[in-house]
Amino acid sequence: MRRFITKRSQKAGLPPGTLVHIGEQKTEKVRISVIDYDEKQLKEMEAETIETCFPFKDSPTVTWINIDGVHQVDIIEKLGSCYNLHPLLLEDILNTEQRPKMEDFGDYLFFVLKMLDLGENGVIEAEQVSLVLGPNCVISFQEHEGDVFNAIRERIRKNKGRIRKSGADYLAYALLDSIVDNYFLILEEIGERMEATEQQLTENPTMETLHSIRKLKKEMIFLRKSVWPLREVINNLERGESPLIHESLNIYLRDVYDHTIQIIDTVESLRDMISGLLDVYLSSISNKMNEVMKVLTIFASIFIPLTFIAGIYGMNFKFMPELEWDWGYFAVLCVMALAASALLIYFKRKKWL
């Protein structure tokens, strides 16, 4: 339930803009990487301290500063002081349970996104990615190392496409597009798991099948929570009038918006399918119970007349003429066998057996 409910007690009573990290507590070292480039040159480095990034502030080239780890508040505070970032923006970076959104601060744009990944046992894990887009820089904040941006780094290193020929706005678009495209991989994995669950459901539904359906349902709720606000973010970015976004980028933003709508439609379709799987499971269990009850009813129907006959001849009356017959016992057994056989034939013709 941590993915749905966040403890915020440590923020209670503090004034707005107070920098407190909210999220999973980590102890590893924060990793800071810098890529500075233009069409002709490229500089890539690992920064030992946050102060190493400060000279790039006034660089005419495009600078991408990526910070893996937001649990050290002093690093975020120093970077915000250098780049004149608003305290409320820094507060949102440290709160790793933010809803995807976009805010325009005039001199820079701020984005909060959810980057999804499949963890152990196929569980969907979400990581908050915060992006700050300035005139010549993009600053990205991640909770830990590992992301979906390796393809972008390779394009920058090998000067493929138009990324080295464009500004910081195109770099921010590329990061956003990578996060959105990764959603398709998550949806494909969920679709395959749904197919496996559906096959198991038709062959032999068990309690484990029910647990799988409930797990899928929870993950789809979590996925919907991460994806739905993204449509609003991209729509506002496309329709906004920020000077940081060039008009030539609008066609690419519309493409990302179309992908987002497609993802949302897929999520809604999968949610409906999961609800259908739950209904099929309940119907299958009900049918199995009905089959069991039918078999028990048939056996009970066969033994009802036999019990009736046995009950009559089990009475302790003195004057029962059949008790003195030499073949009375065998005659009663024959009657009972004929009654059972007649019922079996009747059930067979009715296709109840």
Image (spheres, rainbow, N blue to C red):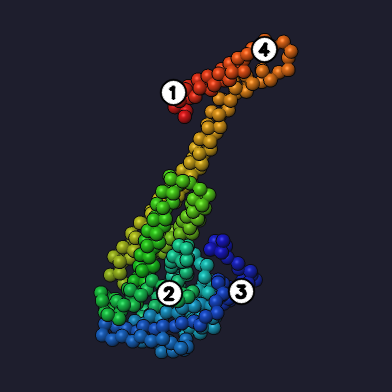
Marks 4/3: CA distance? 103 Å
Query: Which label sits in the foreground, 2 or 4?
Result: 4
Badge 1 is on which residue? 349
Observer-side mark, 3 or 2, equals: 2
Q: Is residue 47 left or right of residue 162?
A: right
Q: Tell me, yes or no, whether the two marked residues, 2 and 4, touch with CB atoms within 8 Å.
A: no
Q: Is residue 209 left or right of residue 36?
A: right
Give the mark nearest the N terminus, 3 or 2: 3
Name the foreground residue: 283 vs 114.
Answer: 283
At a point 44% along the width and 58% down the height, the residue shown is 228
x%, y% of residue 3?
A: 53, 63
Q: Quadrant of residue 297?
A: top right
Q: Earlier in the sequence, mark 1 or mark 2?
A: 2
Label whose residue precedes the other's in the sequence (1 or 4) = 4
Residue assigned mark 4: 324
Q: Secondary structure at mark 1?
A: helix
Give the residue at mark 3.
15
Q: CA distance from mark 1 to mark 3?
A: 81 Å
Instruction: Answer yes or no: is residue 43 visible.
Output: yes
Residue depicted at 37% across the width and 61% down the height: 184
C-alpha span from label 1 to label 4: 39 Å
Residue wearing tag 2: 146
Which amino acid type corresponds to the residue marked 4 in the rendered image? Glu
Q: Residue furthest front?
A: 326
